[in-house]
Image: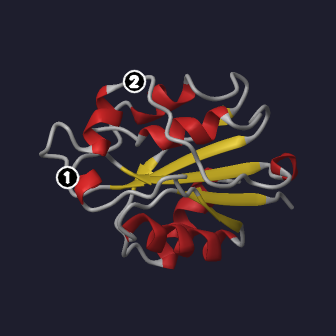
Amino acid sequence: MSKILTAYFSASGTTKKLAKTIAETAKSDLFEIVPEIPYTNDDLKWTNKSSRSSVEMNDKNSRPKISSKVENMEQYDSVFIGFPIWWYEAPRIIQTFLESYDFSGKNIVTFATSGGSGMGKTNNILKLSCSPDAKWCDGKRLSSNTDANTIKNWLDELNI
């Protein structure tokens, strides 16, 4: 039986709810990707070009620091990574997370929440920040209210 980690970043709680459902359904460990400097409501105002989130997303080299690390990442065979979609891709902190560990040989499965946009080129962008021989599975945009049956069917399709 493989050991699974569900790691997620949630600025508003929406992705957190989904991550908990995935972790319960997959019987995985759960890890919250928490920024060293938490985001305020003002930081998240995407219509403000000088808000922290806008500045980070406009800088492809931005790597917000994470406040803690996953202990013993090597024990996991598969890692689900969840996040909200910001500007049609994953927030830069997800690249920080991917660049912090060796994912060689691990299954990587992304999942995202969004008010309307899909995954776009998110996986292609994230692959550049990850170990080259990680095994990427199809990412999926889901609702925060996605039920356990839908998630179980998705997990069965992934065959992890």
Circle 2: residue type: Lys
**Sequence-first tag of 2 and 1:** 1
Q: Is residue 87 visible?
A: no
* Residue 33, x across and y down, in percent: 57, 56
Apparent side of residue 20 relative to residue 13 in the rendered image (left or right): right
The residue wearing badge 1 is 45
Residue at position x 69%, y 37% from top?
100
Front residue (pair 102, 154): 102
* Residue 101, x across and y down, in percent: 73, 37
Front residue (pair 102, 118): 102
The residue wearing badge 2 is 60
| Number of numbered callouts drawn | 2
Q: Which of the 4 image quarters holds residue 34?
A: bottom right
Residue at position x 35%, y 42% from top?
119
92 shown above or below 37: above
Q: Which mark is residue 127?
A: none
Q: Which of the 4 image quarters holds residue 108?
A: top right
Front residue (pair 160, 38): 38
- In the orientation shown, which residue stands out farthest toward the left? 47
Residue at position x 73%, y 25% from top?
133
Q: Which of the 4 image quarters holds residue 3?
A: bottom right
Apparent side of residue 39 relative to residue 50 in the rendered image (left or right): right
